[in-house]
Amino acid sequence: MKFHLLTIFPEFFHGPMDHGVVARAAQRELIEIKVHNLRDWTYDFHKTVDDRPFGGGEGMVMKPQPLFEAVEAILPGRDPARQRVALMSAHGPLFGQRKARELAGFEEVLLICGRYEGVDERVGMHLADEEISIGDYVLSGGELAAAVVVDAVARLLPGVLGNQDSSLQESFSEDEDGQDGILDCPHYTRPADFRGLRVPDVLLAGNHAEIRKWRRQAAIEKTRRLRPDLLDR
Ligand code: SAH
């Protein structure tokens, strides 16, 4: 799967994409991450990507022209069944595991990273297929949000995680009814007694049926304690 990141700060992605699961997936060519400098689609001396807001007010707004031309050049003759364009935006529906699974079904995903006061509204309305927010807070740019999306989507792709089943058993994985899941069960490692804090006996006894039962129950209890909203849906 190919990710395109459209940004005015291409160097931003050196680092976040260079570690662990995502970096290994790229090395093994299971994913490809292409970072595009939005300023390549400007024609003036200063490579201007922003302009003053119509109607007045604070801050600058990202112009539609470089963004439209960039997306059209990166995905010419776009096929909506295979390619998806999303605008990172505090206004979008909240990103979650369900959306990550949906995006994992595309061959190419292009994420537009906004800056300044935001992006000309015509980009969200007429260029992007959707807007995606990673939470109800305002970031200074879409790059961090895009990195979150790439990470969450990449690890769902076949072969990316060492253990094929890992992404089936973790937090928010879909249950049999296709519902968004609950939290992952608690995990423990050695020592069995750390400063008097003991690992539950059932995990030490080696009875796998009992362990499965305990994990399910512990996951429900943990969800009730930390994220009761997940159980009330
Ligand atoms: N004026 C806007 C905020 C702009 S922040 C407002 O009040 O809603 C600049 C850019 O950061 C946005 O264009 C978007 O690309 C990105 N951004 C900010 N918050 C985000 C969030 N919660 N999720 C995804 N992207 C976000």
Image (spheres, grey):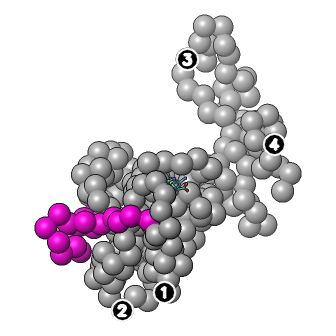
Q: Residue at x 72, y 54 (%)?
A: 181
Ranked by sequence position, the earlier of labels 3 and 4 is: 3
Residue that lies at the very extreme toward the bottom in this rendered image: 77
Label ID, residue 80: 1
Looking at the rendered structure, the kind of residue marked 2 is Gly
**How far is the residue under mark 1 from the one under mark 3?**
51 Å
What is the C-alpha distance between the residues marked 4 and 2? 45 Å
**Rounded to the nearest whole Å, what is the CA distance between mark 4 and mark 1?**
37 Å
Q: Indicate the position of residue 28 as horizontal and vertical percent values.
A: 29, 61
Tag 1 secondary structure: loop
The furthest residue to the top: 195
Mark before the other along the chain sequence, 1 or 3: 1
In magenta stretch: residue 77: no
Residue 140 in sight: yes
Q: Circle 4 — which element?
A: helix
* Numbered range of the magenta stretch: 33-53
Closest to the camera, between mark 3 and mark 4, is 4
Res. 149 in view: no
Residue identified by numbered label 2: 77
Q: Are marks 1 and 3 in contact (CB under 8 Å)?
A: no
* Residue type for callout 1: Pro
The answer to which of 9 and 53 lies nearer the viewer is 53
The three-letter amino acid code for the residue at tag 4 is Pro
- Distance from disc 1 to disc 2, alpha carbons, whole Å, reads 10 Å
In the displayed structure, does residue 84 sit left or right of residue 207? left
Q: Quadrant of residue 120?
A: bottom left
**Which residue: 30% across, 66% down?**
49
Left or right: residue 75 compared with residue 47: right
Residue at the spot of label 3: 191
